[in-house]
Amino acid sequence: MVTFAELVAARAEDDRVGLRFEDAAWTWREVVAEARSRAAEIPRGAHVGVLLENVPEYLFWIFGAALAGGVVVGINPTRRGSELAADIRHTDCAFIVTDASQARLLDGLPLGAPVRLMDEAGVPSRRRGAGGLAGRTEPGREDPLLLLFTSGSTGAPKAVVCSQGRLADIGAYGERFGIGRESVTYVAMPLFHGNSIMANVAMATYAGATITLRRRFSAGAFITDIRKYQATYVNYVGRALAYILATPEAPDDGDNALRVAFGTEASARDMAEFARRFGCQVIEGYGSSEGAISLNRTPETPPDALGLPPEGMEVAVHDQETGLECPRAEFDGTGALVNGDAAIGELVGRNVRFEGYYNNPEAEARRMRDGWYWSGDLGYRDQAGYFYFAGRDLDWLRVDSENFAAAPVERIIARHPKVVMVAVYAIPDPVTGDQVMAAIEGDLTPDELGNFLKRQEDLGTKWAPRYVRLVKEMPLTATNKVDKRGLRKEATATTDPLWHRPGKELRYVPL
């Protein structure tokens, strides 16, 4: 049982390339030397806020904090003004590391911490020396290493604690995805979020693989980068695969070194299409920065299911009001969920490893109740035990006294080949309950959507959208998850093209 600091220190004499960024490269020996230089500037237990894009400095400060027994706070650059300042003050940052391109976001804000301006983001000047770590107590497995804000797609972001031991243990999972000494991993998802650190950097560090960084995600540059770096592994989150697939396909897309793409929240269609187009294996899982519940696909997992929990972890679906376990899902001959009102509940877990939220006991209390961790995500479970995602805890809809969740409706609409992305949400019905509204990113006509939905035998009788909004770009959080808050608030008050279904027939007309 090791700490993440020990994984970093183990690379100190390693002359294999450990990091690549644009046209620069560092051996692992150089990476550790850079980390030790930063570690000398971090007092034991100090919180270092990092406001940077995916640049080498970010990794050097994470590794440096690990060696020093400090904590890196991943600051979300899409937050603004008072909310950004509140994130920094809430996490008690001793100082903020940023560069000129990001520092303007902090101008005039009451941060309660000094700002250290790095060289312009990119290739930093090489530092020398091991740093002043002599005589320091080695950090322990329970010592916190990261504070990672949740995406905030359903409420105020919370700072998730990740310890030295948890990150080290996550690193060992890389073997399941074929990450070894010769692997090259590609990091384009933001480093302030747990996905890139846990599902890429930690695993690559454990294996001594080569980490390649892209400053920020670009769907258009994806295959060019994969070829340039000969990347064998990539992590993703949210709708990243959908955007990559929306770029024009080329006959030689499969001519690359990529072997595995691992992530969360891709549709079954996108997973299959990505695997076909780029000649790799796509492995979908369910997890969060909290790390409390994990669901993994097996070869027998149904296409739309999340999978099963690992051995030793108890996961269930509980009713949010009664706290009791929900009955298993039932499907008709077309595959339609027929008891969603009863079967859909909140995904909960027992025997989980939840290390808490920093300085937020109220949020912790909401998560841990009666010995169960309540995820805030909706789901259901089939007769064979496989779990399915049904949306966030705000994704319930009630139409004509029938309750159902948004995610199954989204999965059906997303089958249309012209739909890049879809978000389904409730807007108030003028009489009672909700009406179904869908925001769609894609180039299709009202008749195409209506005729397509007529052919979907598993579309519930109340599920078809009453209103459809065509968006040029789906609103996303910084981690590529659909952000429905603005869509719900605007409802039909938009200048975007809007369609309406005036009657029971699946026919849409422009509004």
Image: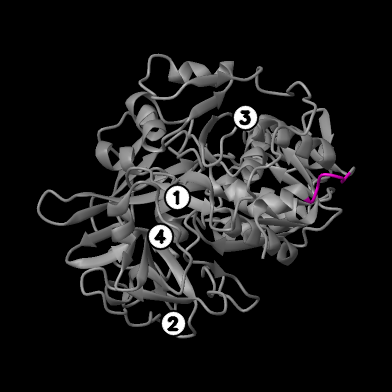
Residue depicted at x 49% and y 38%:
478
Give amino acid for label 1.
Val
Please state the extent of the stretch shown in magenta in the rendering: 10-14
Residue depicted at x 70% and y 55%:
203
Q: Which residue is mark 2?
A: 333
Q: How is the model colour-coded?
A: one colour
Q: Bin the neighbour count of mark 2 within 10 Å (Cα to Cα): few under 14, some 14-19, many 20 and up.
A: few
Give amino acid for label 3.
Glu
Q: Nearer the viewer, mark 3 or mark 1?
A: 3
Splitting the image into 4 quarters, where does residue 212 fall? Answer: top right
Q: Nearer the viewer, mark 2 or mark 3?
A: 3
Q: Nearer the viewer, residue 97 or 429?
A: 97
Left or right? Give the position of 465 relative to 125. left
Pick whichever of labels 3 and 1 is earlier in the sequence: 3
Distance from label 1 to label 4 (Cα)? Answer: 25 Å
Distance from label 2 to label 3 (Cα)? Answer: 64 Å
Q: Which residue is mark 3?
A: 41
Q: Position of residue 262 (x, y in %)?
A: 65, 57
Q: Which residue is mark 1?
A: 160
Secondary element at image label 3: loop
> Which residue is at the far right?
15
Residue depicted at x 43% and y 15%:
107
Q: Position of residue 125 (x, y in %)?
A: 76, 21
